[in-house]
Image (spheres, rainbow, N blue to C red):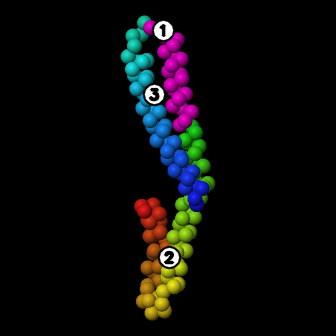
Amino acid sequence: VRLGTIKMLAVGQLKNVFFILKLFVSAYMVDNILLKPASEDGQARIFALVLLTSFTLVPQAILHYLDYSRFGWRVVGKVRMRVMAGLMNSFLYMSEVARSNTDAGDLVDAMTFDTDKVIKEG
């Protein structure tokens, strides 16, 4: 779980860096390429546009791959398993009186629905 969590945090930080890169690329494109008169060097403008496009597309492809491979890190499934095991252990360590007063449907409901809610919403 620890390594997968670190990977997920790293992907989140890469997304933030990519967002800032896109802001700088957009500002450069507007200031230095689109606002200049058309009579200036056209080849340099085309080269700059191709370069800026690659600065946008290549990180986007890398982030797409990392988002896709994130499901193979199995972080959510392992966390769900630990939460369910903890819930079952706390149920089994109850006294007999407390366990007999607990509705079995509440336990099943907590195991199936509430654990997902805790994992997704915190």
Residue pointed to by mark 3: 25
N-term-proximal mark, 3 vs 1: 3
- Is 33 above or below relative to 91? above
User: Secondary structure beneath disc 3?
Assistant: helix
Residue pointed to by mark 1: 41
- Percent position (x, y) of residue 101? 42, 89
Residue 45 magenta-drawn?
A: yes
Q: Quarter of the image containing the C terminus?
A: bottom left
Mark 3 residue crowding within 10 angstroms, few (<14) / some (14–19) / many (20+): some
- Percent position (x, y) of residue 25? 45, 28
**Magenta-highlighted residues:** 40-60
Tell me the kind of residue under disc 2: Leu
In this rendered view, identify the residue nearer to me: 1 or 121.
1
Q: Residue at x 42, y 32 (%)?
A: 23
Tell me the kind of residue under disc 1: Asp
Q: Is residue 64 left or right of residue 16?
A: right
In this rendered view, identify the residue nearer to me: 104 or 99.
99
Residue 100 appears in the picture as rendered: no
